[in-house]
Image (tube, rainbow, N blue to C red):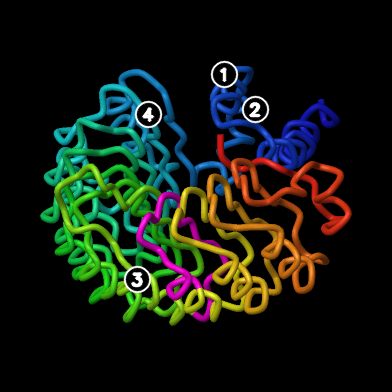
Amino acid sequence: MAAGGDWERETVPRVMAIVSPRLPQRDVYSVLMVSPWCYRAFLSVPTLWEVLDLHEMSKAGERLISALSLVRYEHIKKITLEFAQEVEDEHLILLKSQRTETTLRDLQHLNLNGCQKISDKGIEAITACCPKLRSLSVYWNVRLTDLGIKHLVKNSREVVSLNLSGCKNITDHSLYLIADSYHGLEELDITRCTKLTDSGLQQILLKCFSLRSLNLYALSRQALKITILTDAAYEKIGCLAHLTFLDLCGAQNLSDQGLSCIARCKHLVSLNLTWCVRVTDVGVAAIAEGCRSLELLSLYGIVGVTDKCLEALSNFCSNTLTTLDVNGCVGIKKRSRDDLLKQFPLLRCFKVHS
């Protein structure tokens, strides 16, 4: 009996402490039901209950409320509801009104990607409970407007990572709010936010000097009757001394002049210039000379570049580039895999855009 007691009191908790961090959360829930030993052992590992993963689950709103009513989630730090079903404003408003308002005081990361039934009201409710929120992702939410961003910056003052990709109803006003409130912002994704203009983006670039990752994918849309981004904004990207990731795919108005300013971002590691149709060898050469830590570069679809740009890249970046996409660059004659490997021996990937 004594040996059995030692096993229950000491061995099982130690094993569970080692195993539990390596298990998907849903497997953890299953193991809880195996035996009282497992149940008590898992409850004794506090880091397990700092994360709640409900991605792609049905009735996610009800599950969220039920889980956060448990004491073990008192210090939860991360909630993932990515593409979860049946989670709506009413669930987040209920969280705010219940005791779980204190439960969320330590929440740092919130993923609401694809939760299209959540609107500005839901954002207001959930952020009011999360004063320590550092990361918010609301990809593909067309119900989010400038009002939701206003609630966000008012309630959660410590945000450093913000994904607004596909939030097509936010305007420059949101960028003004973000720029004024989050000077320490490190990551921003405004992919396909097609109501934005130079004015809003310039505010971000002039005030958020800590940016390391900036995603401006598909913001220049000639077919839309709006003011699209120009070099007036792109040139100010050069002010971001800490930038390592930049996606400018589809930046139809980006010129060599704008790209030459971006070349001042000497720590840039990843640069996507896919379909930046005004770029020529001059701009790429400036990037090669200024960004000598570059590991990924896509020039896909740019017909104005030639073998000369590869020569410049080879002179300055041959020891760093591992991914280079020159597919569709008809002006580059030596673009076969073998030709590229002669100039860039570290290349492992030859296609970014698909």
- Residue at the spot 27% in from the left edge and 49% down from the top edge: 193
Q: Position of residue 298 (x, y in %)?
A: 60, 52
Front residue (pair 171, 197): 197
Q: Nearer the viewer, mark 4 or mark 3?
A: 3
Q: Position of residue 186 (x, y in %)?
A: 45, 68
For the C terminus, the quadrant is top right
Front residue (pair 66, 85): 85
Q: Position of residue 353 (x, y in %)?
A: 56, 40
Q: Nearer the viewer, mark 2 or mark 3?
A: 3
- Read off the residue under disc 3: 231
Along the polypeptide, which appears first: circle 1 or circle 3?
Answer: 1
- Read off the residue under disc 4: 83
Marks 2/3 in contact by CB < 8 Å: the verdict is no
Judged from the image, the secondary structure of the residue bearing numbered disc 1 is: loop
Gap between marks 1 and 3 measured at Cα: 59 Å
Gap between marks 4 and 3 measured at Cα: 36 Å
Marks 2/1 in contact by CB < 8 Å: the verdict is yes
- Read off the residue under disc 2: 38
248 part of magenta stretch: yes
Q: Specify the amino acid type for callout 4.
A: Phe
Marks 4/3 in contact by CB < 8 Å: the verdict is no
- Residue at the spot 35% in from the left edge and 75% down from the top edge: 205
Q: Specify the amino acid type for callout 3.
A: Asp
- Read off the residue under disc 1: 33
Gap between marks 2 and 1 measured at Cα: 8 Å
Q: Residues within 10 Å of mark 4 (few under 14, many from 20)?
A: many
Please state the extent of the stretch shown in magenta in the rendering: 241-259
Q: Main secondary structure of the magenta part?
A: loop
Q: Position of residue 150 (x, y in %)?
A: 15, 61
The tally of labels here is 4
For the N terminus, the quadrant is top right
